[in-house]
Amino acid sequence: MAPRPFFRELEEIVAEIFRLHGFDVETNIQIAGLEADLLVASTQGKRAVVEVKSYSSRTMGLSALVRAAHQLIATKHVFRAQHAILAVSASLSVTETDAIKSAHPGLLVYDVNALTFLAVRDAELYQRLDEFLRRSQPFSNPARIIPTNVDPNFDLDQPAMQERPIPTQTLKAKELEESLRNVPPGDGKAYENAATEALTYALSDHFATWLSQHGSETRMSIYDLIARISSDHDFWNTIITQFHSRYVIFEFKNYTDKIGQGQIYTTEKYLYKTALRGTAIIVSPMGPDENAIAAAKGALREHGKLIISLTTDQLIEMLDLKDSGGEPTDVIVAVVDDMLMTLER
């Protein structure tokens, strides 16, 4: 049986944290097409909707958090709750918290430091949260957690959250998904264009520059897309520091079958660790076959070159995460974590 998604597990932990502090908790309640992760009520009858976000990095970009806050405010309006709480597994700075609250006065933000403080009252629950964070954030430093004193009973006893118009968001996931789905099998250029647009949108928080159809200095080889990492995300920092990659190459293969080892070997030739270009991501409808997986692991084991394979469905999952206030990089983290865990000598 496949493990439960990390976000569902964190929802359960956060629900137990609120129950520990005397709240009544309902989970996954739907009204008018919107779902509240948690609906909590204090003994005084004050209610809050809680949006729980699990991230693969202890540090997060502000834009993803703002998108999550916008989504939460829309949910709060529908549920007619007095308060809204954004609970995240990332560690937020005062500046980040203030930026979110400036857009939504009265919004309560409980980051991993606050959740840890609330869980420490129960040793078993604290241990469960700690183990969850270690599993869901494989490239993060656990030492970053500094428990922060919060009191949800006091917070919910305050006057109801100030009402403001719900901000309009530009959501593109469905449009980009449709473009990917409508590419005819075997049409390489159309697939490249659709996948490039999807990737640049999904990973816009983490890359500063994108260059399509870039050739090598001698023009002997041309790869589909190259981008420069500009991110504080723990995974992308690991790519920079441990895999010697400030730049990432992207290749798109619109094959009707799974890609084989030949595509891996071709992509490997584009990678030069001394040029800070030791990582590539290949996107294809079906993903890699067993020989391609073995070839990618061989490139990593023997030369330290990281070649990541994603399917079209995984790219679409990244788009959905982007629009919902999640972190698209989480999809790539899961692939790389599995690759490193199963790497043989």
Image (spheres, grey):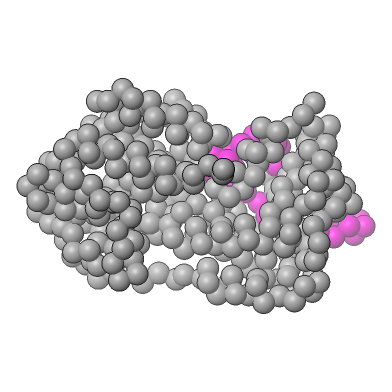
Q: Quarter of the image holding residue 221? A: bottom right
Nearer to the camera, 30 or 65: 30
In the depicted structure, whether residue 145 falls above or below residue 161: above
**Which residue is drawn at the image coordinates 63% and 68% (left, top)?**
197
Count of marks, rendered view? 0
Image coords of residue 283 (percent x, y): 72, 58
Q: Can residue 214 be seen in this view?
A: no
Nearer to the camera, 125 or 218: 125
- Can you say which quadrant of the picture contains the N terminus? top right
**Which residue is drawn at the image coordinates 70% and 33% (left, top)?**
342
Image coords of residue 246 (percent x, y): 67, 44
Examine the structure image and report whether residue 244 is included in the region drawn in magenta.
yes
Nearer to the camera, 180 or 193: 180
**Which residue is drawn at the image coordinates 74% and 41% (left, top)?**
306
Image coords of residue 230 (percent x, y): 58, 49
In the depicted structure, whether residue 122 falls above or below residue 87: above
Q: Residue at the far top: name it.
A: 123
**Which residue is drawn at the image coordinates 58% and 71% (left, top)?**
176
Q: Is 205 left, or right, of 261 in this rendering?
A: left
Q: What stretch is highlighted in magenta?
A: 216-245
Q: Residue at the far left: name it.
A: 44
Examine the structure image and report whether residue 164 is included in the region drawn in magenta.
no
Q: Quarter of the image holding residue 79? A: bottom left
Q: Is 54 left, or right, of 69 in this rendering?
A: right
Q: Is 61 left, or right, of 211 in this rendering?
A: left
